[in-house]
Image (cartoon, rainbow, N blue to C red):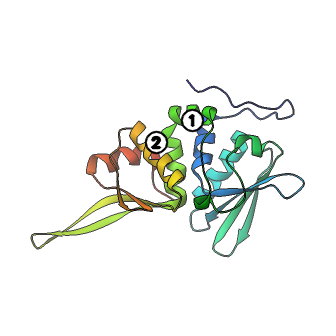
Amino acid sequence: MARSLPLRPDVDNPTDPAAYSYLLGLNGHLVTSARVPVLRIACAASYPDLVEACAQSMLAVLATRVQRIQKVGCVSVESSGAHWPCLLPQHGPGRKHERPIVLAGWQREIVTAHPGDLLRGLFRSDGARFGNRVRVRGKDYVHPRYMLSNKSTDIMGLCQWALDLLGIAWRMNRPDSLSVARRDAVAALDRHVGPKS
């Protein structure tokens, strides 16, 4: 069973482990150069439910206030809080695919208890579900497929681990691209990820 995240006495928001696992999967970054650290996650403006889910997960995990800043083609969902670096200990300078992304033991416990939430964040940030067209013996078929693309081998490894925890079959079709294509695997992932909207 996942234990609660360690909270400082001045943080009065209770931590929601499922929301935290989802937030961990979203593609964001932590700005620590400001007086108070800021967690920023850019969401495609064409998916308002994704923007709202991101904001709600921030509120559930730590924030007392979330800003939605409209930019060209996206909405930057932002939350300031001194405790974000404690909750995201793997943050650091540089691009994610050029540095290690390793979960702390307490983070692994949370993801082990909530792997579907991590996958929902990963696939809604860096993935897609689409109709895969194939031609077999002159006949065209379309079947659903999930793809996740990420240059970080560590982040890809976290995705593979979470899929394995749920018994969902996957394969790497390129070094930076993962595919979930078997009918039963897609159906299982549908139960956790759901449509982007």
Identify the amino acid type marked 1.
Answer: Arg
Q: Quadrant of residue 39?
A: bottom right
Q: Position of residue 45 (x, y in %)?
A: 62, 67
Q: Which residue is mark 2?
A: 162
Decide if residue 154 is on the left or right side of residue 14: left
Identify the amino acid type marked 2.
Answer: Ala
Q: Quadrant of the N terminus?
A: top right
Badges 2 and 1: C-beta atoms under 8 Å apart? Answer: no
Query: Looking at the image, which is closer to me, 92 or 185?
Result: 92
Q: Residue furthest bottom?
A: 72
Query: Looking at the image, which is closer to me, 27 or 189?
Result: 27
**In the rendered structure, which disc, 2 or 1, sits on the residue that comes first in sequence?**
1
Compared with residue 193, is residue 73 higher up or lower down, i.e. above or below?
below
Q: Residue at x 53, y 52 (%)?
A: 155
Q: Position of residue 98 (x, y in %)?
A: 60, 61
Q: Residue at x 63, y 32 (%)?
A: 106
Q: Residue furthest front?
A: 99
Q: Position of residue 180 (x, y in %)?
A: 35, 54
Q: CA distance from mark 2 to mark 1?
A: 10 Å
Give SS at disc 1.
helix
The numbered disc on residue 26 is none
Q: Which residue is mark 1?
A: 108
Q: Position of residue 23 (x, y in %)?
A: 62, 47
Q: Residue at x 72, y 44 (%)?
A: 59
Q: Residue furthest right?
A: 35
Mark 2 surroundings: few (<14), some (14-19) or many (≥20) residues within 10 A: many
Mark 1 surroundings: few (<14), some (14-19) or many (≥20) residues within 10 A: some
Q: Residue at x 68, y 51 (%)?
A: 55
